[in-house]
């Protein structure tokens, strides 16, 4: 309208030309919106993405259109001549940019799970553009002042919470900065966005290039027939028919190491994993992450904070760096002591077998399996045949959800998917009401990020009349030649964990997307996922899904007893590698002087040594160069969240156990106070309302086997 006002004051000829241009632009925009599936509300159930219509070439036009429309909406809010109200400021901000949100939601899910060079190029191109766009909003003094002008005390419920949320987000972003400092902040944010995307793309290359090729089947002695067939298939796909290719997962340790009898092979795979992103090639991430660490410190100090961690934790449950580090340190000492006991037991076994070598990281999983067998008469080969992936999903994860919350699932083969491996389900609540669409992407691909995660294609919102459309992504080995896909118990736990995130999204019951479902602090979001892990060992649930893939026999009670008895086996190792990664994250992000940064490998060693976590036999779960969580995954100064959330989990599970276990009544109580509230209430109060007291560390130590039960 401002452009049009200036036009009508000009000569009539100019007016005609300008009007013609406006009409042409309007027609072009209308054409783009009508022909681009990303710019239209999907007509599929709950606006599930029309993957059959979406093509790579749709993304850039959708981004350009979405950015333009969102800019116009933001300008309208900022320059509204009316007095600020919740409706014309906060609500208008919350409901702006819907076209852009729809397009980016699909895009970033695809770049994580099914990327290609075209999508990667677009991602790199738009990372700084989206960063600048975000700054245009959150560094906008006019909008910030409008929000500040609101009388929050007169607002209620989610309206009040949403206003407080936006006020905090603007302040954390730097809305209070001087104009000169805002310009500095914009440059830092743009560079960080570009570097984060570059890091992610480099790491994908590193993971792919790090795969280990073997000519001789004897090198892989100990692997099952299916595992050998999978390695052959991967080699064939890579143009190395007749050989064997072992791909890397995102963690330091690799899942085949417990089975491989050839020590040289184990060492080769371990070192390929450890060195994957520091080989002075196109997948080397060190220079990128070192720049990011410095820029993050500059950003925090521009905001008046001593370190990035101090700035980052302000809106988390921990709130302060000291609180997070205090929790980690209280667990680290007994965890390392337990790991050292475990290492001695393994070394003793090696010596008894006349191994004549010192225990190294690539030996741990192989020999710890033997220790477990000797101590508990239990090893992975006994367990794995009972965990066929479809049974674990449908008779385990889904069955548990029905037992605990009454929800049911129906496969939807009519809905399009982004890859043939993806399956889709419709989810129904306990009264039979349809509540969500759920996508599942099980198998590893070389164009998929490592790890496992949950995400939304569509987030729940009563105001927008949206029901959740959710995806769980995994990296399990794809079965070959029609063979069943058998998974480890760790994989089973991962499936229940990620579905815990899904439950958090499914049961969202908020008016606004920004407060909905998993839109909670990092150190709280892992709480619902971790408590759902306990369902994997619930006796009723376990006996329903743990069926031998050949005989269909239910897992024997004697084997269940062994699994439970061995629950804290190897816990020292598991906690030490986790705490090492968490502490490493905090070390990078608690630096207060740029001169204190050192080259990546030296910095890592010094940090772990400082906190007593440099244990040769127990490598950190993520070595700095491939620690994607903190360099591109949103967990910068936040990996401690897994430990903080686990502490919440153990407190909550103690309450459940004291009140009869994971019964329907207890789980409905959990749904009411935790799963359904999103970020619409005070989460510390919600937790206390659920169990009757604040979080305590003792349940963590006891349940982890670090203190007496």
Image: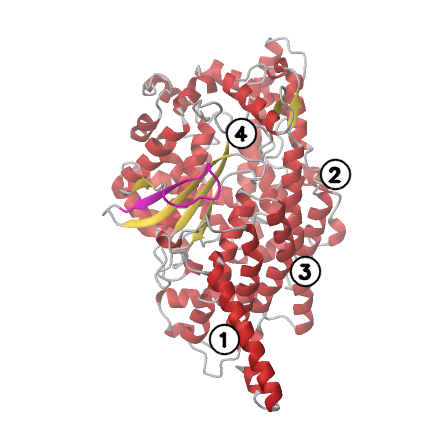
Task: Calculate the distance from the C-alpha at mark 3 to the C-alpha at mark 1.
Answer: 26 Å
Local packing at callout 1 (Cα closer than 10 Å; few below 14, some 14-19, many 20+) is many
The quadrant of the picture occupied by the C terminus is top left
Q: Camera-side residue: 173 or 80?
A: 80
State which region is magenta: 414-429
The residue that mark 4 highlights is 572
Distance Cα–Cα, label 4 vs label 1: 54 Å
Q: Name which quarter of the figure residue 425 lies in.
A: top left
Looking at the rendered image, the disc whose residue lies closer to the viewer, 3 or 1, is: 1
- Which of 140/622 is in front? 140
Q: How far across and down, in percent of the image, does residue 363 sit?
A: 61, 21
Residue placed under numbered mark 1 in the picture: 77
**Up/down of 674 relative to 399, above or below:** below
Residue 658's disc is: none
Q: Judge depth for marks 4 and 1 and give the one in front.
A: 1
* Mark with earlier residue (2, 3): 3
Q: Is residue 422 magenta?
A: yes
């Amino acid at each position: 309208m401002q452009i049009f006002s200036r036009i009508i004051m000009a000569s009539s000829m100019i007016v005609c030309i300008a009007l013609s241009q406006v009409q042409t632009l309007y027609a072009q925009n209308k054409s783009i919106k009508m022909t681009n599936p990303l710019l239209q509300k999907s007509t599929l159930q709950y606006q599930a993405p029309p993957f059959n219509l979406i093509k790579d070439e749709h993304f850039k036009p959708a981004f350009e259109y979405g950015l333009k429309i969102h800019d116009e909406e933001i300008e309208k809010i900022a320059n509204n001549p009316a007095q600020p109200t919740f409706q014309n400021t906060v609500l208008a901000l919350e409901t702006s940019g819907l076209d852009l949100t729809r397009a980016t939601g699909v895009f970033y899910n695809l770049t994580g799970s099914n990327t290609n060079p075209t999508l990667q190029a677009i991602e790199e191109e738009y990372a700084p553009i989206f960063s600048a766009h975000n700054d245009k909003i959150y560094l906008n003094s006019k909008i910030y002042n409008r929000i500040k002008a609101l009388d929050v005390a007169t607002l209620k419920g989610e309206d009040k919470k949403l206003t407080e949320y936006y006020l905090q987000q603007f302040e954390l972003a730097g809305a209070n900065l001087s104009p000169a400092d805002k310009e500095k902040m914009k440059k830092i944010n743009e560079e960080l966005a570009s570097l984060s995307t570059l890091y992610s793309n480099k790491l994908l290359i590193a993971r792919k290039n790090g795969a280990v090729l073997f000519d001789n089947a004897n090198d892989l002695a100990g692997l099952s027939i299916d595992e050998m067939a999978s390695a052959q298939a991967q080699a064939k796909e890579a143009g190395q028919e007749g050989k064997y290719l072992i791909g890397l997962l995102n963690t330091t340790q690799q899942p085949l190491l417990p089975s491989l009898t050839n020590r040289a092979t184990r060492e080769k795979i371990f070192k390929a994993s450890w060195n994957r992103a520091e080989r002075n090639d196109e997948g080397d991430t060190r220079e990128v992450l070192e720049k990011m660490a410095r820029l993050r410190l500059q950003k925090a100090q521009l905001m008046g904070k001593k370190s990035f961690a101090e700035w980052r934790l302000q809106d988390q449950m921990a709130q302060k760096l000291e609180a997070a580090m205090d929790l980690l340190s209280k667990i680290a000492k007994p965890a390392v002591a337990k790991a050292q006991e475990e290492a001695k037991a393994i070394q003793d076994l090696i010596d008894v077998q006349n191994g004549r070598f010192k225990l190294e990281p690539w030996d741990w999983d192989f020999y710890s399996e033997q220790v477990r067998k000797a101590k508990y008469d239990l090893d992975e080969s006994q367990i794995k045949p009972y965990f066929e992936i479809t049974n674990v999903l449908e008779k385990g994860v889904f069955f548990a959800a029905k037992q605990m919350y009454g929800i049911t699932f129906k496969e939807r083969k009519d809905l399009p998917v982004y890859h043939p491996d993806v399956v889709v389900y419709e989810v129904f609540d306990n009264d039979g009401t349809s509540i969500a669409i759920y996508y599942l992407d099980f198998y590893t691909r070389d164009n998929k990020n490592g790890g496992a995660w949950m995400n939304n294609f569509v987030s729940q919102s009563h105001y927008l009349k949206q029901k959740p459309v959710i995806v769980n992504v995994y990296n399990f080995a794809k079965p070959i030649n029609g063979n069943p896909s058998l998974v480890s118990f760790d994989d089973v736990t991962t499936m229940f964990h990620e579905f815990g995130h899904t439950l958090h999204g499914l049961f969202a019951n908020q008016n606004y997307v920004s407060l909905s479902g998993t839109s909670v602090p990092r150190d709280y979001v892992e709480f619902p996922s971790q408590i759902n892990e306990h369902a994997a060992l619930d006796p009723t649930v376990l006996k329903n899904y743990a069926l031998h893939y050949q005989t269909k026999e239910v897992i024997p009670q004697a084997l269940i007893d062994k699994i439970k008895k061995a629950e804290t086996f190897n816990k020292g190792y598991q906690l030490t590698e986790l705490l090492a990664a968490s502490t490493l994250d905090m070390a990078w992000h608690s630096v207060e002087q740029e001169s204190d940064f050192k080259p990546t490998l030296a910095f890592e060693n010094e940090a772990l040594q400082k906190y007593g976590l440099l244990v040769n036999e127990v490598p950190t779960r993520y070595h700095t160069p491939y620690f994607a969580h903190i360099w591109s995954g949103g967990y910068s100064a936040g990996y401690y969240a897994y430990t903080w959330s686990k502490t919440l989990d153990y407190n909550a599970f103690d309450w459940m156990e004291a009140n009869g276990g994971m019964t329907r009544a207890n789980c409905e109580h959990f749904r009411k106070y935790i799963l359904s509230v999103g970020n619409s209430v005070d989460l510390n109060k919600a937790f206390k309302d659920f169990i009757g007291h604040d979080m305590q560390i003792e349940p963590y130590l006891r349940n982890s086997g670090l203190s007496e039960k």
